[in-house]
Amino acid sequence: MPTENYTPDEKDLSILRLLQKDAKMSVRDISARINLSPTPTHERIKRMEKQGIIKEYTAVVDRKKVNKGMMVICMIALNVHNKKTAGKFIEEVSRLKEVVEFYNISGDFDFMLKILAPNMDEFHEFFINKLSEIEGIGQTKSIFVMSSIKESAQIV
């Protein structure tokens, strides 16, 4: 949990860029690339972890190679707009393993879900037996992704 107000400087941003490309890069390799000795480099990384700037380290998996080749963006509008309905909807959708991203949005729809499935039959099964069973859904719109032009977790 953050204990101080900290803003990353250019060295920190350089560290973040390197870690986003290769989270397994050693402190020694990072320090060599940013022209800083290993100890202060390590301290900077630990400070950014402590501040929540670095939230986690993860592997980027090719979804097609793990049988999740179908990607669907599903827009959902609730039929009732109150705290209780939204809270229950958020709680239930958050538990669905097929939903890999979940956003509260503005406009004609209230939520946007990124859903991965092996194929159309499995998506249909998920939609009918899990998603549409959640109370409060008023309208849905599913958009089937034909190909990915750019996918990136790099933000700096």
Image (spheres, helix red, strand yellow):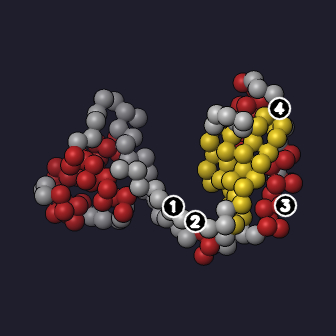
User: In this figure, which residue is indicated by the disc labeled 3?
Assistant: 125
In the displayed structure image, the side of residue 151 where residue 66 appears, left or right: right
Q: Earlier in the sequence, mark 1 or mark 3?
A: 3
Pointer 3 with pointer 2, Cβ within 8 A: no
In the displayed structure image, the side of residue 27 where residue 58 appears, left or right: right
Mark 4 burial class by Cα count in 10 Å: few <14, some 14-19, many 20+:
some
Q: Secondary structure at mark 4?
A: loop
Question: Residue 57, percent across and down?
Answer: 42, 56
Give the CA distance from mark 1 to mark 4. 32 Å
Which residue does the image show at 37% across and 58% down from the upper left? 20
Tell me which corner region of the image, top left, top right, bottom left or bottom right, holds residue 36.
Answer: bottom left
Q: Amino acid at mark 4?
A: Asn
Question: Residue 61, percent across and down?
Answer: 53, 68
Q: Which mark is residue 148?
A: 2
Give the CA distance from mark 1 to mark 3. 26 Å
Pointer 1 with pointer 4, Cβ within 8 A: no
Nearer the observer, 25 or 65? 65
Pointer 1 with pointer 2, Cβ within 8 A: yes
Pointer 3 with pointer 4, Cβ within 8 A: no
Query: Is 108 drawn above or below residue 36 in the view shown?
Result: above
Nearer the observer, 74 or 2? 74
